[in-house]
Amino acid sequence: MKIGNYTKVPYRRSLSLQPRTFKLFSPKEPVLITKHKRTTGNERVFSILIPTWNNLAYLQNCISAIRKNSSYRHQLIIHVNEGRDGTLDWIEQQPDIDYTYSRENVGICFALNAGRELVGTSYMVYLNDDMYVCPRWDEFLFDEIKKVGHPYFFLSSTAIEPAPGNPCTIFHDYGRDIVSFREDDLLREYAGLEKGDWQGSTWPPNVVHTSIWDLVGGYSIEFSPGFYSDPDFSMKLWQAGVRLFKGVSKSRAYHFVSKSTHRLPRRKQYYTFLAKWGITSSTLTTHYLRRGQPFDGELSEAAIPAAVRLKNLLKRWISK
């Protein structure tokens, strides 16, 4: 629905029952998002969607990396939440960038769904604003897409992070913020860091066919501002028949880790996921997606141990 120069995003009631303890994400005013499409071109390969929230230095670093380290030409779509740090002014001066804008922080789900309306390619890439893509990142992803030969896939690049503990990433510290970022060292060493392809694509950088994004309805706003929206999207893909969830080792990006989300209070989207799907997100990532395990082909139907099924049942009962 149009309101002047703004587009009002309609509210859709979730089909799932919300736990009684859940506190909904509630913007201070109606969600109003302006959309600004300024670019054209049929030769672009990916539409890269990047939500940002007063994080200009990281966003500039991210876009600089895309411009100089990509093998192909892409469409850039930025969602500016607030933009009070100069982000909006800077974006307006970049004629090669399409963008959406909200006066307040509407979170990742609204941002990505709004950006979809500007997409002009067959492939949508979701990228965090605190990521730095390494050379040929897009080439390696597109090579994988061409091998697949159908749109039912979900691929991720492999993140390099300065903290250990994630089985899908490479642990190597090239700086924990922009000031300490050792870009030259990263560019010299990233390709030699050991890591094979892995199962369980969930987190960005990721790429999905635009038709499949539309089929599952994009990101679910009941997870706003964004916590647990990634595994929810993967579960929707699973329900649509996607079984190829592959992390591509050669496609790499450095991730400074949660430079925006740490500013948000943690709500109880864990229970939203549980109420919606009847299982915990860890059940999805461990038993369906086998996230972090070596890649060995398309996933088969999940075999859930009896103890895990009982745990999910008890958690559903407790959450009501």
Image (cartoon, rainbow, N blue to C red):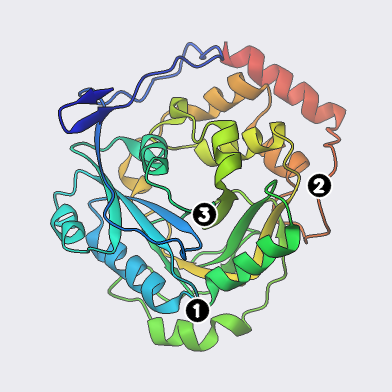
Residue under label 2: 299
Q: Nearer the viewer, residue 125 or 172?
A: 125
- Picture disc at residue 210: none
For marks 2 and 3, the one nearer the N-term is 3
In the rendered view, does 259 fall on the left or right side of 237?
left
Q: Amino acid at mark 1?
A: Pro
Q: Is residue 165 visible?
A: no
The mark total stands at 3
On the image, which quarter does residue 13 sit in? top left
Residue under label 1: 135
Q: Position of residue 235 (x, y in %)?
A: 65, 35
* Label 2 residue SS: loop
Q: Position of residue 203 (x, y in %)?
A: 55, 51
Q: Position of residue 220 (x, y in %)?
A: 49, 30
- Picture disc at residue 204: 3
In the image, residue 84 above or below residue 302 = below
- What residue do we see at 37% from left, 45% from top? 118
On the image, which quarter does residue 267 sit in? top left
